[in-house]
């Protein structure tokens, strides 16, 4: 939709009709990498001098945090739709029998895992989770790696629950069964509470 014919601030009047060349619409379930799932609540425009900037306003499910993402920044921040069934199966298959490599050096491992978490790919998040669970069998995780494991667990459970439109505990059972086949135990959420 071209703003030139609409005028610079008209978009607020019809937010439900706006889209970015078919990218996202109001009500779409999306993922904001490393923050989790949210819903596009509004699409709006703001004028900055001569420039008209369009934004998605999304509400993050876990924190009720509201985030404004400029259209031109969608790719840079990695905003994407919630995974679909085919992708869910790939994640479950990976947790069941996928290979995981862990760097022996803590600094490099943490850096690699941090980069994986920032990609926004749920399969990468699953790789971080599985890698840390394997590592945890050999030795206790550092405080920062425990926090990363907690974050990976949360991101997987919340997005898969939204994708399958079910409760978190159903996803926790699914992931626990998949990991059990790799002789790994899916951690309970309560294990991360102080």
Image (cartoon, rainbow, N blue to C red):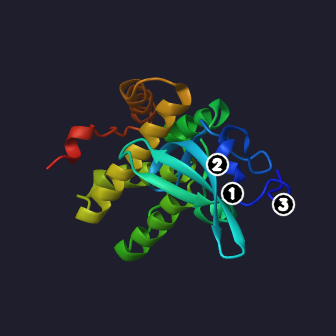
Q: Is residue 190 left or right of residue 49?
A: left
Which numbered disc covers residue 12? 2
Could you say where residue 144 lies in the image, as x and y percent from the top left? Answer: 28, 64
Name the residue at 21% across, 39% down: 190
Q: Residues within 10 Å of mark 1 (few under 14, many from 20)?
A: some
Rounded to the nearest angstrom, the CA distance separating label 2 from label 1 is 7 Å
Rounded to the nearest angstrom, the CA distance separating label 1 from label 3 is 10 Å
The quadrant in which residue 41 appears is top right
Q: How many marks?
A: 3
Answer above or below: position of 51 versus 100. below
Per the image, label 3 sits on a secondary structure element best described as loop
User: Does residue 142 show up?
Assistant: no
Q: To which residue does mark 1 refer?
A: 9
User: Does residue 108 show up?
Assistant: yes
Per the image, label 1 sits on a secondary structure element best described as loop
Could you say where residue 77 lies in the image, as x and y percent from the top left? Answer: 58, 63
Q: To which residue does mark 3 refer?
A: 4
Answer above or below: position of 178 versus 110. above
Q: Nearer the viewer, residue 117 or 4?
A: 4
Name the residue at 75% across, 51% down: 20
């Amino acid at each position: 939709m071209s703003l030139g014919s609409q005028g610079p601030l008209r978009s607020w009047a019809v937010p439900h009709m706006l889209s970015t060349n078919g990218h996202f619409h109001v009500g779409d379930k999306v993922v904001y990498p490393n923050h989790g799932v949210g819903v596009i609540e509004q699409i709006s425009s703001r004028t900055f001098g001569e420039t008209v900037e369009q934004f998605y306003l999304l509400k993050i499910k876990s924190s009720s945090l509201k985030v404004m993402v400029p259209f031109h920044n969608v790719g840079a921040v990695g905003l994407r739709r919630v995974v679909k069934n085919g992708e869910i199966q790939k994640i479950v298959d990976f947790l069941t029998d996928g290979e995981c490599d862990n760097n022996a050096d803590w600094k490099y491992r943490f850096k690699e895992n941090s980069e994986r978490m920032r990609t926004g790919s749920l399969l990468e998040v699953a790789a971080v989770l599985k890698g840390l669970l394997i590592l945890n069998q050999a030795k206790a995780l550092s405080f920062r790696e425990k926090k990363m494991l907690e974050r990976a667990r949360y991101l997987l459970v919340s997005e898969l629950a939204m994708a399958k439109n079910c409760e978190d505990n159903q996803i926790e059972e699914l992931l626990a069964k998949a990991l059990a086949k790799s002789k790994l135990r899916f951690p309970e959420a309560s294990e991360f509470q102080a």
